[in-house]
Image (cartoon, grey):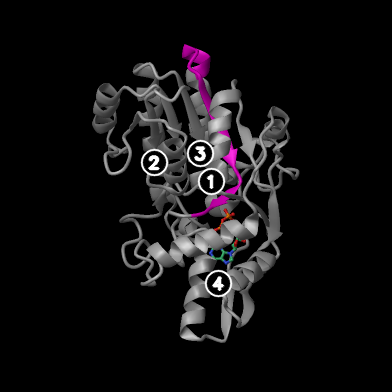
Amino acid sequence: MNRTARVYVAGGDTLIGAALVERLRADGYRNLVGTPPDEPDLTAAWQVEDFFGEARPEYVFLAAGKSGGIRLNQTCPADLMLHNLLATAHVVDCAHRHGVTKLLYLASSCSYPKHAPQPLAVESLMTGPPEPTNTAYATAKLAGWQLCDAYRQQYGARFVTAIPANAFGPHDDFSPDGGHVIPALIRKAHEAKVRGEPALTVWGTGRPRREFIFARDVADACLFVMRHHEGPGPINLGGGAELSIAELARLVADVVGYRGRIGFDAARPDGMPLKTLDSGPLRALGWRPSVDFLAALAETYDWFLRHAAPVSHSPRLAGGLSATPGKPGAI
Ligand code: GDP
């Protein structure tokens, strides 16, 4: 992939997609196509077809498809699944028919079986059912991986799949009900601070553990994988920052400057008890994350303050759940 290649980041306005576009621009890739706001509606087959015919991308990063936190997965499983299935099918098929040189599909760590051995190795995929709160979304992401491998098998397409750990950073969905845990807690802690509230309530028991990766590191890993990874079967993109939700809530409160009490609402679901990735194969190829977790949290809070802080709202869950769920691509 040289710097004059035509590169398309599908889902360029999403958490990981935006980080990819920013990184590619910084690296001097001058032929990026379909960058926001010029991206087609990926759920409309004809728009994707027209776009590929006109823009003729040579490399595709497929970071599109709506996603969200545990609550959004419970309330909008149909919307999340359908959006991901449609967007992925349209992009993968057009990439094949329009002769894309290589495509990298971003799958999700939600797709691992709930009770697979930890850290999660790709050999565990499809050996058991995923966490019930996100079965629909997880199944769509598994289908995306399988679709890439099917095109590889049938047509020799160079379509590879990567699975990032729980990603966070600028451009995330910071809505309190729809977002993943880091952006949701950033908003909740910020608003509790501004309103002088004595306590911040964190969902679940606080005991589940997650591995997190900053979006900029995901972008870096994606470029690395595009250059150095080939073959069927996904590769995990771990960030190495593993902590419990209770520990995370404490760190978020510190970064935000919230000094109140942190409580837990055990009536809310915990989701997977533990989710950490075996990134041995990626490390063996020579990739390491480079962003310090606390610095990344602080940068994310800073972005939130500048772009998302003023209004607390959860439009995707307020009245009409199925209207526009989730932030596209916030894997
Ligand atoms: P998951 O990694 O797929 O389970 O997705 P999430 O990022 O939504 O949730 C991770 C964990 O954080 C779960 O155990 C949640 O119960 C917990 N959690 C605590 N507070 C919140 C919150 O305000 N929003 C979300 N999304 N999760 C929270």
Q: Say whether marks 1 and 4 touch (CB < 8 Å).
A: no
Q: Is 145 located above or below residue 184 in the figure?
A: above
Provide the residue designation for mark 1: 216
Q: Please tell me which of labels 1 and 3 falls first in the chain.
A: 3
Disc 2 to disc 4: CB gap under 8 Å: no
Residue reaching furthest top? 155
**Type of the residue with mark 4:** Val
- The residue segment tinted magenta is 152-169
In this image, 330 relative to 273: left or right?
left
Q: Earlier in the sequence, mark 3 or mark 2?
A: 2
The residues tagged by marks 3 and 4 sit, at their Cα atoms, a distance apart of: 33 Å
- First in sequence: mark 2 vs mark 1: 2
Q: Is residue 145 visible?
A: yes
Q: CA distance from mark 3 to mark 2?
A: 15 Å
> Could you tell me the amino acid type at mark 1?
Arg
Q: Tell me residue 227's x, y (percent).
A: 56, 24
Q: Secondary structure at mark 1?
A: helix
Q: Is residue 157 magenta?
A: yes
Query: Label 3 near label 1: C-beta < 8 Å?
Result: no
For residue 260, side relative to residue 119 (left or right): left
**Residue drawn at the location 40% of the way across and 20% of the way down:** 100
Q: Which residue is mark 2?
A: 11
Residue 198, percent from left and from top: 57, 87
Instruction: Specify few, some or many for label 1: CA neighbours under 10 Å numbering under 14, 14-19, or 20 or more.
Output: many
Q: Residue at x 51, y 18 (%)?
A: 152
In 3D space, how far apart are the residues under numbered discs 1 and 4 (Cα atoms)? Answer: 21 Å
> Pointer 4: what residue?
256
Residue behind mark 3: 141
Judge whether 69 appears above or below 85 on screen: below
Instruction: Name the secondary structure under disc 2.
Output: loop
Mark 3: secondary structure: helix
Q: Helix or strand or loop: what does disc 4 sit on?
A: helix
